[in-house]
């Protein structure tokens, strides 16, 4: 029987291939974006809590120590600097949500 000699990169490629096959058999699945995070726009804290606080000015002021008009003005000033680009794979966190995180 002839011996087969493999290069180091071929060994790594084979190990990775067998690892991927074993993960599929075991039911493990790897995600680029976890399914719970795909519902962030509907279930996230910003969309529930902060947008509701905008309706009640006293609660909003208690959380951010500024009025909604001041928050909107500050967002207009720093929004373009804190905004990130959306990609094909996931949506970025909005500038308003980033500002709310920074201020809280």
Image (cartoon, rainbow, N blue to C red):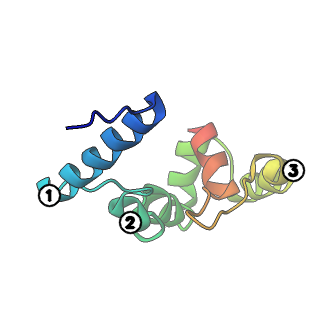
**Any mark on residue 25, and which?**
1
Q: CA–CA distance between discs 2 and 3?
A: 27 Å
**What residue do we see at 33% from left, 53% from top?**
30
> Where is residue 88 drawn, in percent x and y?
62, 68
Q: Residue furthest right?
A: 77
Q: Which mark is residue 43?
A: 2
Q: Position of residue 78 (x, y in %)?
A: 82, 47
Total numbered labels: 3
Disc 3 is placed on an element classified as: helix
Foreground mark, 2 or 3, reads 2
Quarter assignment of residue 29:
bottom left
Instruction: Look at the image and tell me in which quarter the C terminus lies.
Output: top right
Residue plotted at (42% across, 66% down): 38
Relative to the observer, which residue lies in front, 9 or 26? 9
Tell me where residue 93 appears, x and y as whole percent: 60, 55
Q: Is residue 56 left or right of residue 49?
A: right
Q: Residues within 10 Å of mark 1 (few under 14, many from 20)?
A: few
Residue hosting label 3: 77
Q: Earlier in the sequence, mark 2 or mark 3?
A: 2
């Amino acid at each position: 029987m002839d011996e087969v000699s493999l290069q180091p990169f071929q060994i790594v490629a084979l190990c990775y291939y067998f690892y991927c096959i074993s993960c599929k058999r075991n039911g493990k699945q790897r995600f680029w974006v976890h399914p719970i995070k795909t519902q962030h726009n509907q279930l996230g804290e910003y969309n529930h809590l902060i947008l509701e606080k905008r309706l009640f000015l006293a609660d909003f002021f208690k959380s951010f120590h500024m009025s909604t008009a001041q928050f909107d003005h500050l967002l207009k000033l720093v929004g373009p600097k804190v905004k990130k680009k959306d990609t094909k794979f996931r949506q970025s966190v909005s500038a308003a949500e980033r500002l709310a995180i920074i201020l809280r």
